[in-house]
Image (cartoon, rainbow, N blue to C red):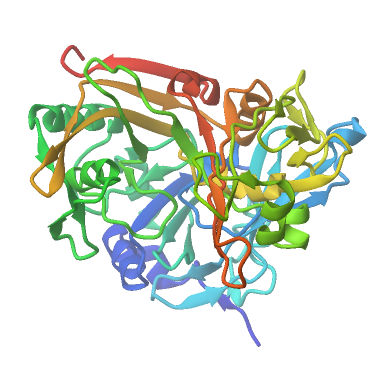
Amino acid sequence: MAKHKAYDTDAAKRVTLGKIISIFKDLGSVKLYAKCLAPNDNSKNQPYLGGHLTDLAFIPTGEPIPSPTTSTKSRDPKRQIKYQVPTDFSWVDADGSVYRAPNTKLIYYPQYPEVRLSGFLLGSQVDAGEWMNRYKKGTSLGRWLIIGVTPKKMVYGYLVTPECQLSNELENTKFLDIGSVFGQIDLDGIGVTDTRAALLNKLLQIHHMGWIFGQRLKGDGSRIDYKALNGGGYTLESLLDIIPNGISQPDYLGWEVKQFGVSEFPQKSPKPTTLMAPEPDGGIYKTRGATEFVRAFGYPDKSGIPDRINFGGRHSAKAFCKATSLTLHVEGFDEEAGQITDASGAITLRNDEGTLAVSWSFAKIMNHWKRKHAQAVYVPCMMRPAGKGREYHYGSQIELGVGTDFEMFLLATLKRAVYYDPGIKLENASSDKSKLKVRSQFRANHRDLPTLYSDMYLIDLLES
């Protein structure tokens, strides 16, 4: 079947940004991003997308797959590793036609570190002409890559060539600032480029609103009362007009938004922050099942509830947990260098005999941590009863965390800033109708959050 020369047509040369936005929206895209391609962004060298997977939280992907690499850039055999990260990618042309690119993947090289786009032309019916060929026009300036993402985790791409008017239009477009590589195209016409200033201004408005009854934003944009205990996060997202859309984590102008409970302002007695809750993918927990795992390593309920076995307790790196007789390890990571040494490494819980009770592969944890935005805001929140529900008040002293990556998470785990805090229980344990409830979460005390970011800023909205 002949390939389609998608980006050298008359339509491609005349297409406007408005038309491209319309095409992406028709395909279901709710977020649109653009990157000006450098001379070495081509099919030979692989386009550079960012330094870490967390820089690309906006791109829906599958779970990373560990893979050895034959690259000669690093002579250390322990650093000859990479992760292939699949993504459901298709090319689109100026007429709205779609061309699947089934072999597209992100390649994460932790040793450099860098993330590159690979396989984006292999097996596709799109013909990028000479614009991605290193030995022809694949080093030309004025090329752009536009990426759109949908709630169904589809990713669409459009290649802009220097010979079309769209290239000049993008040069003069003001993007939402979400990082150093990609800019976000303003689909909603909010007219913001300084996303940090806009975020702080919005949070100040919310602070001045005082006590707010719990609410949640529905998919159609309408608000409903929310009375459950976990309403602090839903209410804040609703006030920020964040509609759950299935794309990574909910965000406001590229910032991950997290609230944390406090007893009073300024923040006092902040509660630990749950970072993520990935299910284990190794050990007895996986091979024999969670129920048998709890029977083997759990303990009778300490509050006296009959016929219930719990698996809980704080598990910190290299520290024996008396409740479960297990110790947490980070295997395949060099603490001194802060680097992954084994692509198939894992966070594990082992007993004194070395039995692997439970584990989370780096690939598994990486996939969860990748969803964390490289920039996050932490907002203090007080709660009080109100009728049959609850009210929330958001503080003025907020914290901004900027720059994170998976290796920082592993290092923080080894330094015991991050710990495993499960809440697994087996009810009616002795009967044939036992009921299992699982909760495998990694948490951090609020004071330890700075270990997860390159920079952490404490800002009083009333003074900023």
Q: Which image quarter: residue 376?
A: top left
Which quadrant is home to the N terminus?
Answer: bottom right
Q: Residue furthest top?
A: 463
Taking the spot 74% from the left edge, 35% from the top edge, the residue there is: 325
User: Left or right: 134 with respect to 226?
Assistant: right
Give above or below for 436 relative to 399: below
Taking the spot 75% from the left edge, 22% from the top edge, the residue there is: 335
User: Left or right: 359 with respect to 21?
Assistant: right
User: Left or right: 24 with respect to 231?
Assistant: right
Taking the spot 81% from the left edge, 38% from the top edge, the residue there is: 351
Residue 208 appears at what percent x and percent y?
A: 9, 27
- Which of 275/101 is in front? 275
Residue 146 appears at what percent x and percent y?
A: 44, 55
Taking the spot 55% from the left edge, 62% from the top edge, the residue there is: 428
Residue 170 appears at what percent x and percent y?
A: 36, 47
Residue 47 appears at what percent x and percent y?
A: 62, 48
Residue 38 visible at all:
no
Give above or below for 65 relative to 237: below
- Which of 401/303 is in front? 303
- Which of 224/24 is in front? 224
